[in-house]
Amino acid sequence: MPQELGLEGCDFCKFVNYEDSDDFYLYEMGTCKCKPLYSYTHLVKNRIIIHFVLNGKGILKINGKTYDVGPHQVFLIPSDTKTFYQADKDDPWEYAWFHIGGPKIPLILKEAGLTPSNPVYTPMACADKIETLVWDIMENNSRQYYCIGTLYQILGYMIENSKAKQDDTFDDSLLYVKNVISYIQLKYTEPVKIEKIAASLGLNRSYLTRLFKEATGYSPQEYLLTYRMKMAMKMLSENVLSISEIATAVGYGDTFTFSKAFKRHFGKSPSEYRGTDYSMAPGMTGR
């Protein structure tokens, strides 16, 4: 079992800040074998926390509801939501957690049936396989792409073995959102009109915006902007292209407009950011 510590009350904690992926960010991971009635209150910004209960049990309080959570279940701490959870008095839980983010994460979790309104997941099968992979990530925490790939594998198992999947309750509207994300990631270097994307899907802009915002927390326009800023930040850290070349590369017609948007997003101009270690820079939202 990993031994690195970082937070009081944790058996293991590692801050990793893996943000190279376009869709999936991993910020932190850890494990905790809790004492009886050990409790924690969370209110996190711009990220989601998922807990995998390995042994024991406890309660989760969120949005005015209380949930009993036991072995092999997974519970969600949504972004911007005050959450309380507590270990049982007689059989306190042991869990592993991951702080994750990225525009597709809410979509993936929703496919598994794990949402702010349904924050506890019970696998229909494969619980042992999922927990083996959780420990595998902890043991290989310094390997960025291995960790991200293994988390994708875990989430894949969760989707395939979820009640939502078994009941065939997957929301087809999420396919629209996935298509928009893929389109923006492919075309962000060009002029992009959200109206044209909506029309290509047979939707009006306001309806698409609502679907996208509900699924990701961003409007399509906000996602386009933040994705362009993320790519620009990465190019600036590489220190190869000029600022005007970067502006063109991320879809801006002139350097002034790009620089103004970049400073509004991150609080610093592109020239101030040039050469910054990309892995230490702020996340996608710039907040």
Image (spheres, rainbow, N blue to C red):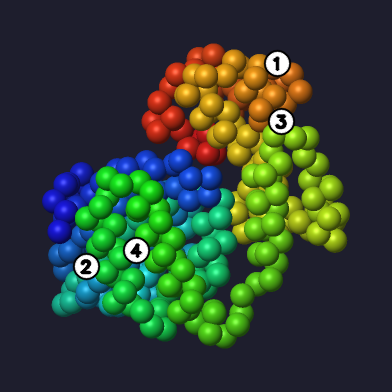
Mark drawn on residue 51: 4
- Badge 2 amino acid: Glu
Can residue 47 be spotted in the picture?
Answer: no
Mark 2–mark 4 contact, CB under 8 Å? no
| Kind of element beneath mark 2 | strand
User: Quarter-wise, where is residue 6 in the image?
Assistant: top left
Q: CA distance from mark 2 to mark 1?
A: 53 Å
> Can you tell which of label 2 and label 1 is closer to the viewer?
1
Reading the image, the residue beneath label 1 is 256
Q: Tag 3, which secondary structure?
A: loop
Residue identifier under label 2? 94
What percent of the width, then of the height, locates residue 59?
Answer: 32, 72
- Distance, label 2 to label 3, CA atoms, is 48 Å
Whether pointer 1 and pointer 4 mark residues with C-beta atoms closer than 8 Å, the reply is no
- Residue under label 3, please give it: 251
Residue 238 left/right relative to 32: right
**Of callouts 2 and 3, which one flags the residue occurring earlier in the amino acid sequence?**
2
Residue 115, horizontal then vertical, whole percent: 52, 67
Relative to 101, residue 230 above or below: above
